[in-house]
Amino acid sequence: MNVDNFRLELGGKEYVPIIIGGMGVNISTTELAVAAAKLGGIGHISDAIVSYVCDRIFNTSFVSRKRKKYAQYSNNPDKSAVLFDLEEVAAAQKKYIEYTMGKKTGPGSIFLNCMEKLTMNSGIETLKVRLTSAMDAGIDGLTLAAGLNLRTLDLIKDHSRFRDVKIGIIISSVRALAIFLKRAVRLDRLPDYIIVEGPLAGGHLGFGPGDWQTFDLKTIFTEVLAFLKKEELNIPVIPAGGIFTGTDAVDYLKMGAKGVQVATRFTISKEAGLPAEVKQNYINAKEEDIVVNMASTTGYPMRMLTSSPTLRYAIRPNCEGLGYLLENGGKCTYIDEYYAALEERKTGEPLVIKEKTCLCTGMANYDCWTCGHTTYRLKETTNRLANGKWQLPRAEDIFLDYQFSTDHTIRLPEQEVT
Ligand SMILES: Cc1cc2nc3c(=O)[nH]c(=O)nc-3n(C[C@H](O)[C@H](O)[C@H](O)COP(=O)(O)O)c2cc1C
């Protein structure tokens, strides 16, 4: 039995039950999402730091315009006045999503991963613009992630696509699910799918800093299924985190999952946005090189390679141009630590920042090498080239391996000649 024996049904449409998870900032690129859709699955793009992503792809100037406007705050720890222009947020979002949707072919879909923890110094207003612009631009689905807000559905309830766009949530506990569903029931707009993300995933984890090791995906997934059964709710449940082979996926599909969300295997695909050299670092990583730390300013634990350059940052905060992680009121724990370190530094000593990192800059520059727990196994999935480097597989190779492999085998991509 393989993944191809199953189908995911969403809103009357059938998919190969493989979803490539959102990976900000621009690791899950347009090209990666398009590849999944072409093969009949679902691909995600992410709107994390989309103004910067637009500038890179389209040569626009969203970031420099904002940086210029707020230049006088660059040496000021008080960033409360550094606000996004909502029209600019909408313009960047539409440009990126229209571009992506314009490239889509095949029977699958493209969804947007929307992390609500990107509070952008005005959480609710910016979130509303992000979601409505995405729907205006024709996105097939919205996956609400990281920091789910109970008011989110209210923000978009008057949009003409509110009932037709697919809406999903990522949760890591029955408790979070139950809270979200209460509001959804009142609006008569249940999510179309529920992604249950366990502690082996990449990016931020939906667990506490000290307790993520005590959870496992299978248990949470089973609890979610039982909860939905008790509530007589028929919503597809999609596990994520550590599903490394097609056979891992089949195990969940047999248990009642309607699809799986995967990401780590695709980080090294040709289509993923990480620079080629960084992809080599991912493949070469050993298990001990992968850690969960609290360097993110969001307050959530995050998994990354210990060699991530961002962990050695001592740079001035970049909120004037970026500022995606500013909490309402312009706060960010990196700003606090940076200015405290500046004050404490003795003359002639280098500036050292130990606890937090400037995540906006780190993610935008591909200096924060976030990854899933199974990253150390990526070397099992590809070939060594004659020049000693690893071959980067195509997204299609990885997708088809998930779809058709059996017995935990991994079909290697056809050997590339260098
Ligand atoms: C490099 C990387 C970046 C990620 N970034 C995000 C993100 O921006 N938002 C999000 O909701 N999940 C993010 N994730 C989580 C994935 O979407 C996915 O749910 C999870 O990693 C699946 O587990 P796997 O990587 O073990 O296959 C990220 C994962 C990776 C590997």
Image (tube, grey):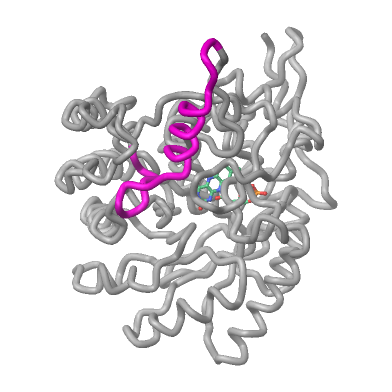
Instruction: Compare residues 411 and 187 and report the one nearer the observer.
Output: 187
The stretch drawn in magenta includes residue 226: no
**Is the C terminus in the top left, top right, bottom left or bottom right quadrant?**
top right
Q: Is residue 261 left or right of residue 71?
A: right
Snapshot quadrant of residue 308: top right
Count of marks overlaid on the render: 0
Q: Is residue 144 above or below residue 254?
A: above
| Residue 249 position in % (x across, y down) | 71, 58
Q: State the extent of the magenta-drawn residues as a range.
A: 323-348
State left or right for residue 200 relative to residue 41: right
Q: Quadrant of residue 122?
A: bottom left
Residue 265 visible to an observer of this rendering: yes
Q: Is residue 400 visible?
A: no
Q: Residue at x 72, y 52 (%)?
A: 242
Q: Nearer the viewer, residue 246 or 363?
A: 363
Please, is residue 153 above or below residue 304 in the view? below
Q: Is 155 or 54 nearer to us in this picture? A: 155
- Where is residue 66? Give x, y as percent: 21, 32
Q: Residue at x 73, y 73 (%)?
A: 255
Residue 325 part of the magenta-drawn span:
yes
In the drawing, does residue 186 fall left or right of residue 253?
left
The N terminus lies in which quarter of the figure?
bottom right
Name which residue lies at 77% across and 19% down: 384
x, y (%) of residue 243?
71, 53
251, 152: nearer the viewer = 152
**Residue at position x 53%, y 23% from top?**
345
Residue lying farthest to the right in this orientation: 407
Residue 226 in the image, given as x and y percentages of width and height: 67, 84
